[in-house]
Image: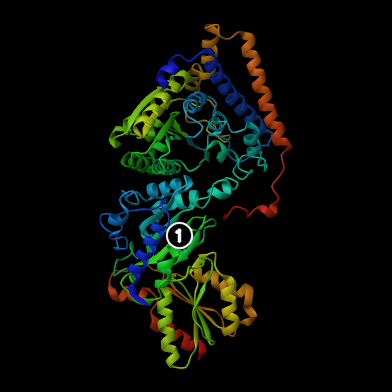
Amino acid sequence: MTRLTYREALKQGLREALQSSDKVFLLGEDVGRYGGSFAVSKGLLQEFGPDRIMDVPLSESGFTGAGIGAALGGMRPIVEIMTVNFSLLAMDQIVNNAATLLHMSGGQLNVPLVIRMSCGIGRQLAAQHSHSWEPLFAHIPGLKVVSAGTHEDARKMIMAALLDPNPVILFEYTAMMNLEADMEDPLPAVDLSKAKLRKSGKDLSLITYGSGVYKCLHAAGELAKEGMEVEVLDLRSLRPIDTEAIVASVRKTHRALMVDDAWQSVSISSEVSARIMENCFYELDAPVQRLNGLEVPMPYPKHLEDAAIVQPSQIVNKVRQMLG
Amino acid sequence: MTAQEQTMKADASLKMKLLRQMLLIRRFEEKSAEMYTKEKIRGFLHLYIGEEAVATGVTAALSPDDNVLATYREHGQALARGVDPGAIMAEMYGKQEGCSLGRGGSMHLFDAKTKFYGGNAIVAGHLPMAVGMALADKKMKRNQVTCCFFGDGAAAEGEFHEAMNLAALWQVPVLFVCENNLYAMGTALKYSHAVTDLEKKAPGYGIASATVDGMDVLAVLDAAHKAVDTIRTTGKPYFLVCQTYRFRAHSMFDAELYRDKNEVDEWKERDPVTRLEEQLTAEVALSADDVLKMKKEVEQEVDRSVDFAEKGTWEPVDQISRYVYK
């Protein structure tokens, strides 16, 4: 067991990826000399040199497109878009090129590219720097979209994403960077396509991902004190979504609550709810419920930011109601 | 002897090869228009007629190992690169014998064999990719050039400027070829660019640039040889602006309200195909009979491409989700 922060777990994952092949290189804004906007890549420039850790100008479309081209040219780039908030500037490259080329070329060109971005709230960063935009990417065929909601996934998802021959979007979480946790060492490889049961329970399924995982685990701990055995299913993969795991959990608990910080309308939670209806409606003892971020641009003051995202206490209260 | 000098001494056989290539593009495009009116080809169809010298001249300066990326008006580049005319026509028919399995149509020709990377229909969207392909070549120490065609419209896009900066910053072997046909769809150059001498945009990025008469295939070939030689020697990017003109409408849905018929006629006086043909007959390298023979061969080749497309088959609907993921 090693105790380490989410940031350190990410760095170890990156290091492992860079060590795995000379073809792997990291490019992104401030990843080198600055050490990474969240200090994730701090020290890697010294360790791997400027050809492997490439600082780029502020040109999200340009360097994301260059990552796609380098992948087509036989390299294995990891593009870091500093935060999801800036990803819209690269959306043309991601959607029109990375996600499309394989199908549009009749199977001739695949894009083995990993795009990492930090997601969700930071510390009072207001409306343009606090987005939870996983659903935007999960909408797009041709992309794989994964979300590192735990230290273990922060550590292992980068390598798994690199081994995938498709473009993979990897979400990391700004608010979790300093969070410490114990981690097994060495860790087994992760299967990117599978959801993971983080806690088993029989009374209700909390279905979540990303910044929701630890909140749900915390809430489940509180509820256990009151005798409620709540299950926590971490989706991990947002495209494709592991429907089988969702159905298995709902068949066991007969109640489902979706928890995530993204806006609710047309979201992962909408999709999961629909899949439950389609696949195991008659297993339900109660309607599927959802807790999401409020549909407002993120406000700056702390109390309003807190109000805009899901809090563990809300999860506890909601579960009490649903089981009450 | 440098490649440039070699071009200067381009013998009659090279010129005849260039003429044949341009004739093939011209005839292929005319046939495509015909097939469009017969509703064999649907969707958007952008013809290259008038601009043949650019693709023909530039591509002739490349080696088979080099990468080529082009726009949605790319039949000429694909043919010049050696993509099979039948596979291109079948692609436009939407048949699975097409070079992109029929998935892409006119705007999305891809052919990995000839290193032809599209067929990219978001204006300037392929420029960053071209930089990345050149970066991969540099990292893997392959002495290859990535040639990226785009239009004057693309030079107004942010991705053009980002790509130019990245290419210069990273010193990667990209040949940016701007086919300046004076119109971004229906908006004239002067309404799109504050500085209409597009080659002047390169020095600001520290990129060498040149401009050439894009209606003269020999001049284009010379300029392209010079550019490619420079790139192979220095490893740095190069920006070549070819001044050209499209004789036909932007696409098949264009009433051409934005330009004067006299202007079109004036440019037609500079037809790159006629120009080389006349030059070759004047040099007595080519007789009227030779020209006729060449045109007949080209006609047959284009007819064969139509036959191939006609005989092609439709991809079964149950394969529609194939290749969303590898």
Residue B275 position (above or below residue B151): above
Crowd class of label 1 (few under 14; some 14 to 19; many from 20; radius 10 Å): many
Q: Position of residue B121 (x, y in %)?
A: 51, 42
- Kindly tell me whether residue B196 is visible in this rendering: no
Q: Which of the 4 image quarters holds residue A48?
A: bottom left
Q: Position of residue A139 (x, y in %)?
A: 51, 60
For image coordinates 51% across by 89% down, the residue present is A323
Residue A91 vs residue A151, the one in the foreground: A151
Q: Position of residue B308 (x, y in %)?
A: 70, 34
Q: How is the image coloured?
A: rainbow
Q: Secondary structure at mark 1?
A: strand
Residue A237 position (above or below residue A81): below
For image coordinates 42% across by 75% down, the residue present is A212
Read off the residue under disc 1.
A169
For image coordinates 46% across by 18% down, the residue present is B218
Q: Position of residue B180 (x, y in %)?
A: 43, 29
Residue B115 vs residue A269, the one in the foreground: B115
Residue B83 vs residue A104, the one in the foreground: B83
- Kindly tell me whether residue A37 is visible in this rendering: yes
Badge 1: chain ID: A
